Image: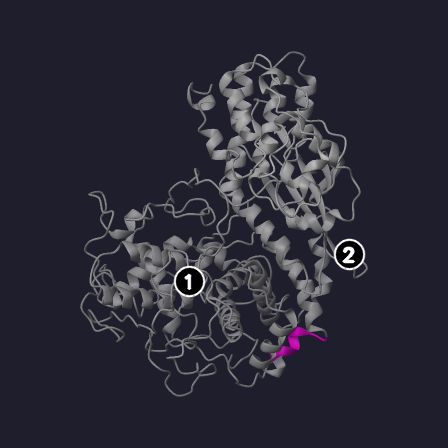
């Protein structure tokens, strides 16, 4: 920047606000129909008009703007999702594009973000509903491995999914499972207060239900519930409310001991009957002993004692025989 | 996924070029914008990663828009503002504007309009859409340090070389190199250049195997001498006499001393023969112009040295240094920011590296990584983001 005087006037500059209209993505994707509405926003099936009309899944997330524009946490999370995409992990749904709805007419305080994902026809929930007979042992093992591989990948990048459930696990035409609907956890947190959608509790670990701090172990718990469901095609712990969900859990794994009960929890241990642990083999009949042992290790009350996703992948259930 | 690397033809045929702005002028605008981000960032104590990220956004932005449509200094502010948030070193928009105002002439600041903050806010959305929300950007700094760790030789000389390479990386932000090559490749090339200029010949390195001809073969495949020279020349061009930018926003007079960027090499550096201009330089004093043959003239930074003191070289302690939010090193005199035509600027001064930076993220409960990106080809798809742990085992 020289302090020299500038003798020529600058070239004609268009005002920034004049051209911002160019950046509406309305023309880029054509919304077809709603696939799902969740706590975190609406997912549409859409056509990618710039890519030969490819079908994509477009997730609409409203972001509250701050005095200094788009919140840092949202930007960090999008940056991370974009960065993850470079690895093209086979068990993670592809993130194809991120765009926003442009400037709205009124100077409003929110921005509509679109996360554009590959579209996969079915999720595990509908897959399980449609299968008329039990899944083969091979299918169960391969799907379990896919789910845990995806979780391990997220965890190795410091991402906690927090809402794993069959509805968020996509099943491709070749029977592979991909994780969807992760990330933007901090963004959702602020957004969630605005929605009153009922979120399924069946896959929630006790530490989340009790409101204590949690970490990557939450996903292992949820995956344990899903793995059990692959064997029976029925939810393992179908609680009807927060408190009922805890009862369901303790009925299965037994009421934790006083030493195990976390501090600073508003719910008293004594508010639960002294449930004795059930034999998981009775709940999951005819299950391979290795699979049983694995699921037991994933459904441990204390998050610190629970298996990690990597532990699970190295379990004899997967390593004793090669996966097909 | 967006791909951010362009060949020289694309770099010539930019939106600005199609908007009747000459390549020389565009390159000057890019350089001024980048320098402005560096100056503003350093004045606000932002770390080198934040500044570099902002500059990369800036260069990418103008691959889609003309400098005529979007004045460079307000775009630069917006890039720094966004980079601050992405790199978790946020600065308030109004503070960035305040510093920008102090660094710009009144006429240049006029391009910010009546409500500068609102303009930057609007521009933020345009910027995000333009760079396709691809916010995480890697820079050569971390690679420099990683490579240096593997090289064997006199420690003081090695240190000196890395410091020089670090400075070249800072300055390379003013070129379009980040639109041409992955940070790994730029790090190799500028370390190579620093090695030549500081007389540090790398004869051995950890992890050497018989297939390696040079140390960089261990890190990046298929780097040719021609490519290294091309990159080095683009940086060295920054130090050759520039046409004065007294014309403000209008294109400058036809340059006499400088060939268009997209030409292969400026003749002042290219020897008439096929002799490699860089490879033959082996035993000249550091930081003085070198001659090796009648026409060979490599001009190291002394000609027009670094006009800013930032960012400091953080030392070899950590493989991936976090942003250092420190003021410029105290050993340096205040940077002669507006030194165009002023007294000769100080020679390169290097400071003691600050203490080892803390790890960037707090440890979390995660298993070790199983997924490593594939090795980087000479010019393949963009490399994946920084892995949570190094790609290569420590030597």
Colour scheme employed for the rendering of this structure: one colour
Q: Secondary structure at mark 1?
A: loop
In the displayed structure, does residue B58 sit left or right of residue B355? right
Point out the frontmost of discs 1 and 2: 1
Name the image quarter holding residue B157.
Answer: bottom left
Please tell me which residue lies in front, A322 or B299: A322
Residue B7 in the image, given as x and y percentages of width and height: 45, 53
Considering depth in this image, is A173 or A315 the residue closer to the camera? A315
Dot label at residue B357? 1
In this figure, which residue is indicated by the disc labeled 2? Answer: A104
As drawn, B166 above or below A162: below
In the depicted structure, whether residue B49 falls above or below residue B1: below
SS at badge 2: loop
Residue sitting at x 37%, y 73%:
B239
Q: Which image quadrant: the N terminus of chain B?
A: top right
**For the magenta stretch, what is the residue range?**
B108-114
Magenta region, main secondary structure: helix
- Point out residue A27 in the picture as x, y percentages from the top left corner: 72, 46
**Is residue B331 within the magenta segment?**
no
Residue A110, visible in the rendered structure = yes
**Which residue reaches farthest right?**
A106
A24 to the left or right of A307: right
Location of residue B94 in the rendering, given as x and y in whole percent from the top left corner: 65, 73
Chain of the residue on which disc 2 is drawn? A
């Amino acid at each position: 920047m020289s302090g020299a005087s500038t003798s020529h006037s600058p070239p004609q500059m268009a005002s920034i606000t004049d051209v911002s209209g160019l950046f509406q993505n309305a023309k880029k994707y054509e919304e077809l129909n709603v696939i799902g509405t969740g706590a975190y926003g609406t997912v549409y099936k859409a056509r990618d008009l710039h890519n030969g009309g490819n079908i994509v899944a477009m997730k609409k997330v409203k972001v509250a703007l701050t005095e200094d524009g788009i919140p840092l946490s949202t930007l960090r999370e999008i940056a991370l999702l974009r960065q993850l995409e470079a690895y093209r992990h086979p068990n993670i749904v592809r993130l194809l594009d991120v765009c926003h709805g442009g400037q709205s007419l009124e100077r409003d305080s929110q921005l509509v973000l679109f996360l554009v994902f590959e579209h996969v026809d079915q999720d595990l929930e509908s897959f399980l509903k449609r299968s008329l007979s039990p899944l083969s042992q091979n299918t169960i093992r391969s799907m379990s491995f896919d789910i845990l591989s995806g979780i391990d990948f997220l965890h190795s990048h410091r991402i906690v999914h927090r809402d794993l459930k069959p509805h968020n696990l996509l099943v491709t035409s070749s029977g592979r499972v991909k994780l969807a609907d992760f990330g933007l956890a901090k963004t959702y947190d602020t957004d969630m207060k605005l929605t009153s959608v009922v979120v399924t509790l069946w896959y929630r670990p006790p530490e989340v239900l009790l409101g204590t701090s949690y970490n990557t172990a939450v996903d292992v718990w949820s995956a344990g519930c899903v793995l059990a469901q692959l064997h029976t095609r029925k939810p393992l712990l179908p609680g009807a409310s927060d408190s009922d969900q805890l009862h369901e859990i303790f009925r299965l794994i037994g009421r934790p001991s006083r030493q195990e009960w976390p501090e600073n929890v508003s719910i008293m241990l004594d508010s639960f009957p002294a449930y004795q642990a059930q034999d998981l083999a009775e709940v999951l009949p005819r299950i391979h002993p290795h699979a049983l042992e694995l699921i037991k290790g994933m459904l441990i009350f204390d998050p610190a004692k629970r298996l990690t996703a990597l532990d699970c992948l190295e379990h004899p259930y997967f390593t004793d025989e090669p996966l097909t | 996924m967006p791909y951010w690397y362009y060949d020289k033809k694309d770099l010539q045929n930019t939106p600005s070029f199609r908007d009747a702005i000459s390549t020389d002028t565009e390159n000057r605008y890019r350089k001024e914008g980048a320098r402005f981000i560096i100056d503003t960032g350093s004045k606000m104590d932002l770390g080198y990663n934040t500044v570099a990220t902002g500059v990369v956004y800036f260069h990418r932005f103008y691959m889609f828009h003309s400098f005529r449509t979007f004045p460079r200094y307000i775009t630069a502010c917006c890039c720094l503002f966004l980079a601050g948030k992405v790199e978790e070193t946020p600065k308030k928009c109004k503070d960035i504007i305040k510093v920008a105002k102090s660094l710009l002439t009144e006429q240049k600041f006029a391009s910010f309009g009546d409500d500068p903050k609102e303009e930057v806010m609007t521009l933020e959305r345009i910027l995000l859409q333009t760079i396709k929300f691809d916010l995480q950007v890697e820079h050569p700094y971390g690679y420099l340090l990683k490579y240096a760790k593997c090289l064997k030789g006199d420690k003081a000389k090695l240190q000196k070389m890395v410091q020089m390479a670090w400075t070249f990386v800072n300055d390379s932000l003013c070129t379009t190199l980040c639109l041409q090559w992955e940070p790994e490749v730029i790090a190799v090339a500028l370390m190579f250049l620093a090695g030549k200029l500081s007389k540090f010949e790398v004869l051995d390195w950890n992890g050497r195997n018989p297939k390696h001809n040079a140390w960089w073969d261990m890190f990046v495949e298929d780097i040719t001498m021609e490519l290294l020279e091309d990159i080095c020349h683009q940086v060295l061009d920054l130090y050759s006499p520039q046409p004065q930018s007294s014309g403000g926003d209008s294109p400058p007079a036809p340059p006499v001393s400088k060939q268009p960027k997209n030409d292969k090499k400026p003749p002042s550096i290219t020897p008439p023969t096929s002799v490699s201009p860089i490879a033959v330089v082996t035993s000249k004093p550091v930081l003085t112009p070198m001659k090796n043959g009648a026409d060979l003239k490599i001009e190291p930074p002394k000609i027009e040295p670094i006009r800013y003191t930032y960012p400091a070289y953080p030392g070899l302690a950590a493989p991936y240094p976090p942003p250092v939010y420190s003021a410029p090193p105290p050993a340096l005199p205040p940077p002669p920011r507006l030194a165009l035509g002023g007294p000769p600027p100080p020679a390169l001064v290097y400071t003691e590296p600050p203490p080892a930076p803390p790890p960037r993220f707090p440890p979390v409960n995660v298993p070790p990584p199983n997924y490593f990106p594939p090795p980087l080809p000479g010019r393949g798809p963009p490399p994946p983001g920084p892995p949570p742990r190094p790609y290569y085992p420590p030597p």
